[in-house]
Image (cartoon, rainbow, N blue to C red):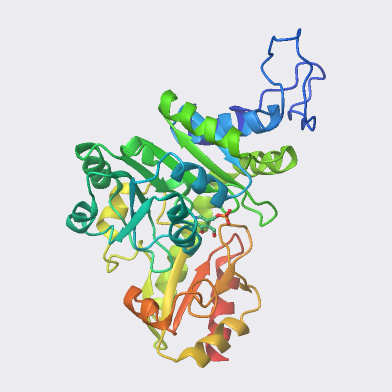
Amino acid sequence: MKFRTRAIHVGNARDAQSGAVVPPIHVASTFVQPAAGQWGQFDYSRSGNPTRANLEQTLASLEGGTRALAFASGMAATHCATMLLEAGQHIVAGTDIYGGTYRLLHKIVNRAGIRVTLANSQDLAALEAAITPETRLLWIESPGNPLMSITDIAACAELARRRRILLAVDNTFASPVLTRPLELGAQIVMHSATKYLGGHSDVLGGALVVADQELYDRLYFIQNATGGVLGPFDSFLVSRGLKTLELRVVEQCRTAQRLAEFLQTDARVRRVLYPGLPAHPGHEIAARQMHGGFGAMLSFELEGDFEKTRRVVGATRLFQLAVSLGAVESLIEQPAAMSHASYDPAARAAHGISDGLIRLSVGLEDFDDLRDDLHQALDA
Ligand SMILES: Cc1ncc(COP(=O)(O)O)c(C=O)c1O
């Protein structure tokens, strides 16, 4: 079955008892056992829940994996993956990772005696130089936030294979519609399901997807032991979101591409950062690695200063001023004041995040309306 058919049918078997075409939401926290000391498929909802299991089946299929685990948030999923390591071991992560991942690695994971080194994931030599005999995990993200940097996942997978370490890819920005890292040689795919998978700004969730049963067993043990699972109602919302994932993402990418091209023509815009533009430094890799579009996230830089930029992001009417991304409603934000405000100004400058940078999450509204909204905000 093709992607969009699997999104609707895998993990969504009709209910055998009632014939309902949508499986019921299983709210039970505990399940009756056949006899003392005998276990059925489910026993306790932290260890496994039918509604969560349905979602996990769909996710595994869409990412081209065999098993998935659904978590209460993207951060819970990332944390679970890092707990594969033990004290004395080492993680290499790309510099363009999500700020919350940076915080988790440097303020929580480090407490367990696990060391972290950041390296530019667009520079394979820099990544390789950061790997030590203790390194067990390489963590990357593509496109990167907020500059839409593109990392060559297949090349990172080859490096990880050669150095016998795991490669984990945060695939939140691309979604499995555009990029499937397991097919490119990664061992773990991570998602903030809060974003494109859910797709409607109404649920928080996370996921890990793998192809290897032994790796799944290790991750499942950690998830069950630590307990950050996704609840049944939220699992249902993500499952429902997945049914329209391909349609949403492809359409959102189309609009993002047109908006990027439109913004390029405005004299008040210094540069547009979108992998679908031939001038983007990662365009060639993106064209190989992303299928069906170049993502629905884009950033652009104004000629203006911090205050002018602040006025523009405050002047849009359809683009709502909020962090997060990936939903049907378009969002706008100023990284220097919002998503990346916790970086000190020197670190922001080193990352190329200027005060004039604006990040858009392009939703499902009509292109003309979104273009007009940006136009009037720039005028304002
Ligand atoms: C790329 C990326 N990874 C991970 C996360 C964390 O996910 P959550 O907020 O669901 O915990 C986010 C959230 O914004 C994100 O954008």
Name the side, left or right, on which 335 lies relative to 150. Answer: right
Name the side, left or right, on which 276 lies relative to 191. Answer: left
In the image, is residue 239 above or below residue 12?
A: below
Looking at this view, is 193 or 44 the one in front?
44
Q: Which residue is drawn at 26% across and 65% down?
A: 281
Q: Is residue 271 visible?
A: no
* Residue 49 position within the rendered picture, expressed as x and y whole percent measured from the top left: 69, 29
In the image, is residue 284 above or below residue 198?
A: below
Q: Which residue is drawn at 60% across and 39% down?
A: 226
In the image, is residue 44 above or below residue 146?
A: above
Name the side, left or right, on which 208 lies relative to 36. Answer: left
Q: Which residue is drawn at 54% across and 42% down?
A: 207
Location of the C terminus by quadrant is bottom right
Label total for image = 0
* Residue 228 position within the rendered picture, expressed as x and y whole percent measured from the top left: 62, 42
Looking at this view, is 209 or 61 the one in front?
209
Looking at this view, is 182 or 177 the one in front?
182
* Residue 230 position within the rendered picture, expressed as x and y whole percent measured from the top left: 66, 41
Looking at this view, is 234 or 330 the one in front?
234
* Residue 63 position within the rendered picture, expressed as x and y whole percent measured from the top left: 46, 36
Q: Is residue 180 visible?
A: yes
Name the side, left or right, on which 312 lies relative to 266. Answer: right
